């Protein structure tokens, strides 16, 4: 039986910096996230293309229409 010797190399320790957020900052971030989620939910699930944000271009409308089908929203 033979023995194989493997040389062990230690990698230098990786420094990880952490970012702390105050409670007010966390609340503001949560409020922004909830607001953005509600806007996305409205345009995908409720609006159904009635708001013409992009003028006469129907590309965005069709993309949102397909998103509604993908997410299971009834749309027609």
Image (cartoon, helix red, strand yellow):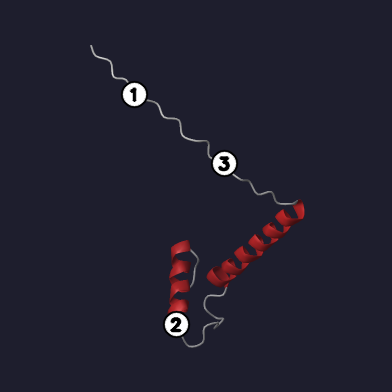
Query: Secondary structure beneath disc 1?
Result: loop
- As measured in the structure, the alpha-carbon distance from the residue carrying label 3 to the one carrying label 2 is 49 Å
Return the residue found at the far left. Answer: 1
Sequence-earlier tag: 3 or 2? 3
> Where residue 65 appears, x then y in whole percent?
46, 73
Earlier in the chain: of badge 2 and badge 1, it is: 1
Give the residue drawn at x 52%, y 75%: 48
Choose between 39 and 48: the one closer to the eye.
39
Q: Which mark is residue 15?
A: 3
Residue at x 60% of width, y 63% of height: 37
Q: Along the line of sight, which residue is nearer the eye, 57 or 15?
A: 15
Q: Residues within 10 Å of mark 1 (few under 14, many from 20)?
A: few
Is disc 2 placed on a helix, strand or loop?
A: loop
- N-term-proximal mark, 1 vs 3: 1
Indicate the quadrant where residue 42 lies.
Answer: bottom right
Whether 12 is drawn above or below 1: the answer is: below
Q: Which residue is mark 1?
A: 6
Q: Residue tagged by mark 2?
A: 58
Residue 1 placement (x, y as % from top left): 23, 11
Kindly identify the residue that appears in the image at 67 percent across and 63 percent down: 32
């Amino acid at each position: 039986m033979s023995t194989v010797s493997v040389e062990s190399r230690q990698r230098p320790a990786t420094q990880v910096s952490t970012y702390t957020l105050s409670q007010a900052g966390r609340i503001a971030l949560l409020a922004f996230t909830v607001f953005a989620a509600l806007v996305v939910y409205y345009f995908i699930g409720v609006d159904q293309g009635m708001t013409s944000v992009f003028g006469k271009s129907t590309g965005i409308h069709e993309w949102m229409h397909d998103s509604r089908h993908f997410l299971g929203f009834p749309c027609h």
